[in-house]
Image (cartoon, rainbow, N blue to C red):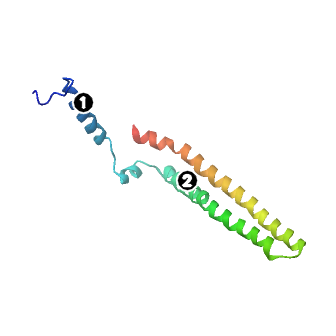
Amino acid sequence: MAEDMELNGNSDSKQDSKSKAKEEAAKTVPLYKLFYFADPLDHLLMFMGTVGAIGNGVSMPLMTLIFGNMINAFGGNENTDEVVNEVSKASLKFVYLAVGTFFASFLRKYIELSDSGSSYNLSN
């Protein structure tokens, strides 16, 4: 009994920490069980959120490629009209990329927020 006591004389704190650890271990769920509780709407929302996240992640490498094309337009053309034409094309691509990135980010975040209901259902 004296060996179980801590320096401050409280042996209950070890038992409390062990019981808390057991309770936390009992609340864990395997990964495949997470999708067991999802209905078809949740599956659709997860798919759409994944598509939005992929679109959002692809935007930065695409921006780098478009920026490289714009820089090449400055060096590759000696005629001012051609430079303006090529830079205008690249600028328009930047606008398209910005609109696409906005919708992908919005889709990802909106789906993330609207899908929080399934995590509520899972916890109850």
The image quarter containing residue 95 is bottom right
- Give above or below for 49 relative to 120: below
- The crowding category of the residue bearing disc 1, from other C-alpha atoms within 10 Å (few below 14, some 14 to 19, many at least 20), is few
Q: Is residue 122 left or right of residue 102?
A: left
Mark identifier at residue 123: none
- Give above or below for 80 relative to 15: below
- The crowding category of the residue bearing disc 2, from other C-alpha atoms within 10 Å (few below 14, some 14 to 19, many at least 20), is many
Q: CA distance from mark 1 to mark 2?
A: 41 Å
Residue toward you, 7 or 61:
7
Q: Amino acid at mark 1?
A: Asp
As drawn, the residue found furthest toward the top would be 9
Residue toward you, 21 or 108:
21
Q: Earlier in the sequence, mark 1 or mark 2?
A: 1
The quadrant of the rendering that contains the C terminus is top left
Q: Residue at x 23, y 28 (%)?
A: 13
Q: Amino acid at mark 2?
A: Gly
Q: Residue at x 52, y 45 (%)?
A: 115
Write down the residue under mark 2.
49
Q: Is residue 69 left or right of residue 33?
A: right
Q: Position of residue 58 (x, y in %)?
A: 61, 62
Write down the residue under mark 1.
16
As drawn, the residue found furthest toward the left would be 1
The label nearer to you, 1 versus 2, is 1
The image quarter containing residue 79 is bottom right
Q: Is residue 99 left or right of residue 26?
A: right
